[in-house]
Amino acid sequence: MFLKVQLPWNVIIPAENLDAKGLLLQRSIIIRLLEDFAARKATKDLGYYLAVTTLESIGEGRVRQQTGDVMFPVVFSGITFKLYRGEILEGVVHKVLKHGVFLRCGPVENIYLSHLKMPGYSYMPGENPMFNDKVSRIEKDIVVRFIVIGTKWLEAEREFQALVSLEGHYLGPVS
Amino acid sequence: MEKGGKGFSLPTKTARKSSLKSTTAKQASLKGKDDSSAKSKRAMKVQFDIEGSLGGKFETLPPKDSSKWGKGDKTAKGGKGSVSKPPPPLELKIEQELPENVKCMMDCEAADILQGIQDQMTILSKDPEFKLPPSFDRGLLYAKRVDHYTSPPSVRQVLQTLKKYGVSDGEMCVIANACPELVDEVFALVPSLKNKRSKLSEPLKDVLGELAKLKKSTSLESQMKSADAGNPGNVGGLGVVD
């Protein structure tokens, strides 16, 4: 699900950028905020960081004694994306294995749908492996609607993985 | 005074925070002894290994209940030999999980905003220092693919009418994102609404009717195509699993 977040942030402007005043200083603060935001990539609480939408406020700068940089406390709004247990989403199949498929949904690359959670589907090996039942097939590039049954945050990679299921009505391949 | 090494016992009433105590509590829970006083002192996450390529441990539901709605809880007990209480249903409980100053957005609202940023890219990228987050492109692509509506503010307005029936923001977003055609579909995809079925059914019919008017024409065409293909069991081409 997409989330609208409002966050406090400390933007550090190096001493050499402090010659500027007014709009140029504001530009430096925004650019630095966008850099820091992009570098963060994702967090466990808020999910994948997608975009900064508005800069709500810039507080008074405080000089950092050791370096001479100035720290500006800011508040901004942005958009993130995170998967939640019980959520209904659509993903695209990008890998088909014997025991299940991997899907991607937005920025999340590793979403696993086990064959155990695909009731009625059987694996068909071949050059284009797939899972099929009487009326539809789950193969590469097919869009599938699923329910999220579990998520996992990987601190080192700063990414999420998820386990999903097709058990339930109105879930499965979407035409 | 009890000391470690003198023999384990079930946690006593005196609250002792020691690793020995937590081990005792853990062993007790794995053996299926329900000592709620120990459990309440620390939120223990018992995590399950899931079979499959991913490996590792997920915060999820007990692996045995694959035939029904999976039920899981962050403080779930061990899967082996635990006292069998009916596990909680697989429902979206996003309001409980959202930090402060965080709100749900509908996919169409996000698509609007992200596309707006994309439209400014020619100007923004003139500044060599401008950086976009790495997930922006994938987020935008996804939002555009699942964006079914012509006017996100109108969708929000239509769904707000459900608020007085106790429908939460998260539930409204799931309804909008799933783009359901039938009231049954809403209750199937958002089971947390089932206990309000009697008072929600009529308002939901009206809401779905209004949302249908706000849908983009391309999605309507694809729905008509799949209806013409004569798939009585499917709604919009989706597999309905009993």
Image (cartoon, rainbow, N blue to C red):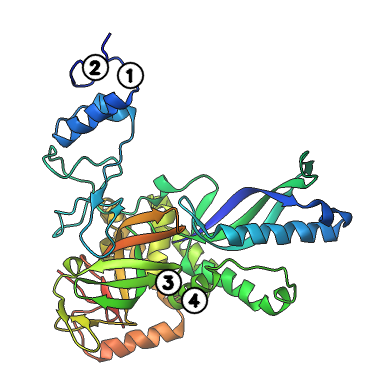
Residue B16: give its label.
Answer: 1
Q: Secondary structure at mark 3?
A: helix
Chain of the residue displaying label 3: B
Comparing marks 3 and 4, which lies closer to the viewer? 4
In the picture, the quarter occupied by the N terminus of chain A is bottom left
Residue lying at the far front in this picture: please name it: B5
> Which residue is label 3 attached to?
B211
Mark 2 Cα within 10 Å, few/some/many (few <14, many 20+)?
A: few
Label 2 and label 3: CA atoms lie apart by 58 Å
Label 1 and label 3: CA atoms lie apart by 56 Å
> Which residue is label 2 attached to?
B12
Q: Secondary structure at mark 1?
A: loop
Residue B141: give its label.
Answer: 4
- Residue A68 at x, y = what percent? 80, 45
State the image quarter where residue B169 is shown.
Answer: bottom left
Is the C-beta separation of discs 4 and 1 under 8 Å?
no
Mark 1 Cα within 10 Å, few/some/many (few <14, many 20+)?
A: few
Q: Residue at x 13, y 74 (%)?
A: A120
Q: Amino acid at mark 4?
A: Leu
Q: Is residue B61 left or right of residue B141?
A: left
Q: Secondary structure at mark 2?
A: loop
